[in-house]
Image: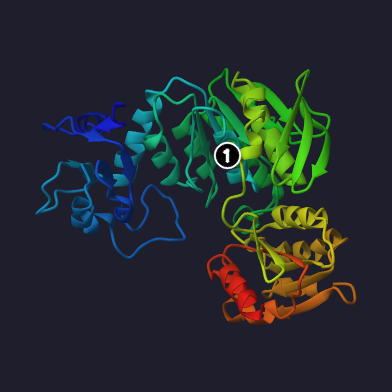
């Protein structure tokens, strides 16, 4: 039987708590009382983030209000800001359960791990690249999209000390957040997957976005390695750099489609490596190259990862396909920005379609600031080979108005009132349709499942 992830006494010592605590084992750390299971440590966070962080999902209730539910679900102990009456399991009291509690434990977790740590960020493709890296044997990686001020420390707290590699994804909701997360994570390798016009409303310019992403290097030690796309400047970092992409140290030599899969040949330094990707797509090749470059930077064997890449599929909302009523629906609705929408259209163009059409249902790309209309009309340059486009949202009206004759299938102003049956009625057997937009456009409203249901009813 393997040793527990933590003991209650170890957590208490790490957080500087006074008093006596048992050596009860802890195998899971969570801030969500609904996820507590026997042997969990429950971290009771405030509903309003502390530490200057911002969350779009702030709660009107605080985590310690659910202490009784966590105890009933089998929690071994909990981190709280004050003693809670009626709770019988150990309570580790700290001033601030986020900064002093969760972040404090994350620092202790990082301090006891001496293997390679790859921290990654980027404007698009972070989670997909993280999933490629997670395929390395014995690796521990951030679950889902745990990439913010609570997701990153939870990743560190739950990472196994005996893992071969830690992979930690980092995102941002405000300027300066990447640097703080990087300094908490202290990666030995820092990867910037790409820099694209995302969060322009908050950051103001592409250069500001570049600075924010490259600030991940602030967490690197002097002998750390920064992994960058070809052509991206990062003069702020004076240490070692490995690049991926065209003409870079890690680059694609060739690829050959075989059905949904692509057989790819890449150069990793002076070594040629062949691998498969299922499904294959240009952006997935780039993400795979980023992962291979990071493994090389960590002094691990890139070929060991390469043979695992064909087992890495697509996460929910990021390109999952299903066939219904003769129509192939690609759910890429988890999020959308100019780079990821262009990538989705490029992948759709590359599809072999027999007896049907390539259709894109596109929703607004949000947080683009004053240049949002230009970014939306700019998608028109990515529509070669796309047979029809249905636009959703006020910003997508800018694209709809410049679509070539016969390519526009319709426009609807409000995703909340969009009837899935209306879109289903435009589709016919043999069509391949991709649904893509910012999270609030289709993902939050569960549009794709409703579209699938409408197609089933139509069949």
Residue 188 visible, this angle: yes
Give the residue drawn at x 27%, y 30%: 14
What residue did someone put label 1 on? 130
Please determine whether, in this image, residue 396 is positioned above or below residue 162: below
Residue 414 visible, this angle: no
Q: Residues within 10 Å of mark 1 (few under 14, many from 20)?
A: many
Quadrant that contains the C terminus: bottom right
Residue 147 placement (x, y as % from top left): 50, 45
Quadrant that contains the N terminus: top left
Q: Nearer the viewer, residue 139 or 229?
A: 139
Residue 168 placement (x, y as % from top left): 51, 36
Q: Nearer the viewer, residue 94 or 88?
A: 88
Q: Nearer the viewer, residue 178 or 309?
A: 309
Give the residue drawn at x 27%, y 50%: 44
Left or right of 91: which side holds 59? right
Q: Nearer the viewer, residue 315 or 1?
A: 1
Marks counted in the figure total 1
Q: Residue furthest right?
A: 405
Please determine whether, in this image, residue 125 is positioned above or below residue 376: above
Left or right of 371: which side holds 50? left
Give the residue drawn at x 80%, y 55%: 351
Residue 82 placement (x, y as % from top left): 17, 49
Please determine whether, in this image, residue 100 is positioned above or below residue 415: above
**Image quadrant where residue 13 sits:** top left
Report the colour scheme: rainbow
Residue 104 placement (x, y as % from top left): 33, 35
**Image quadrant where residue 100 sits:** top left
| Element type at mark 1 | helix
**Image quadrant where residue 188 sits:** top right
């Amino acid at each position: 039987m393997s040793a527990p992830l933590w003991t209650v006494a170890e957590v208490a010592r790490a957080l500087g708590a006074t008093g006596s605590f048992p050596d009860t084992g802890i195998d899971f750390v969570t801030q969500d009382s609904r996820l507590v299971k026997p042997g969990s440590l429950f971290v009771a966070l405030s509903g309003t983030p502390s530490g200057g962080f911002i969350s779009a999902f702030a709660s009107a209730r605080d985590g310690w209000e659910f202490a009784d539910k966590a105890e009933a679900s089998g929690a071994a102990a909990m981190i709280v800001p004050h003693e809670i009456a009626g709770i019988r399991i150990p309570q580790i009291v700290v001033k601030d359960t986020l900064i002093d509690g969760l972040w404090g434990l994350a620092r202790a977790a990082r301090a006891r791990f001496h293997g390679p740590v790859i921290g990654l960020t980027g404007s698009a493709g972070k989670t997909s690249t993280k999933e490629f890296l997670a395929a390395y044997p014995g690796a521990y990686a951030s679950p889902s999209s745990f990439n913010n001020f609570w997701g990153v420390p939870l990743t560190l707290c739950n990472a196994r000390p005996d893992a071969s590699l830690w992979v930690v994804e980092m995102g941002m909701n405000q300027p300066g957040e990447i640097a703080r997360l990087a300094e908490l994570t202290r990666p030995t390798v820092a990867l910037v997957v790409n820099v694209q016009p995302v969060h322009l409303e908050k950051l103001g310019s592409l250069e500001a976005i570049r600075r924010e992403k490259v600030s991940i290097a602030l967490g690197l030690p002097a002998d750390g390695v920064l992994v960058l796309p070809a052509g991206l400047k990062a003069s702020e970092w004076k240490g070692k750099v490995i690049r991926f992409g065209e003409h870079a140290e890690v680059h694609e030599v060739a690829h050959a489609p075989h059905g949904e899969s692509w057989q790819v040949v890449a150069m990793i330094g002076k070594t040629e490596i062949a691998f498969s990707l299922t499904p294959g797509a240009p952006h997935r090749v780039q993400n795979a190259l980023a992962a291979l470059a990071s493994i090389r930077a960590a002094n691990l064997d890139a070929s060991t990862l390469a043979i695992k890449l064909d087992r890495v599929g697509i996460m929910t909302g990021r390109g999952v396909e299903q066939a219904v009523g003769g129509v192939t629906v690609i759910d890429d609705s988890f999020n959308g920005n100019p780079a990821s929408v262009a990538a989705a259209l490029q992948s759709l163009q590359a599809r072999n379609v027999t007896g049907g059409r390539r259709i894109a249902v596109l929703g607004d790309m949000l947080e683009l600031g004053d240049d949002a209309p230009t970014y939306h009309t700019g998608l028109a340059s990515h529509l070669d080979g796309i047979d029809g486009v249905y636009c959703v949202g006020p910003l997508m009206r800018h694209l709809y108005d410049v679509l070539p004759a016969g390519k526009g299938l319709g426009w609807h102003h409000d995703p909340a009132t969009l009837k899935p049956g209306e879109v289903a009625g435009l589709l016919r057997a043999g069509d391949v349709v991709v649904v893509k937009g910012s999270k609030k456009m289709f993902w939050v409203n569960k549009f794709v499942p409703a579209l699938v249901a409408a197609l089933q009813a139509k069949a």
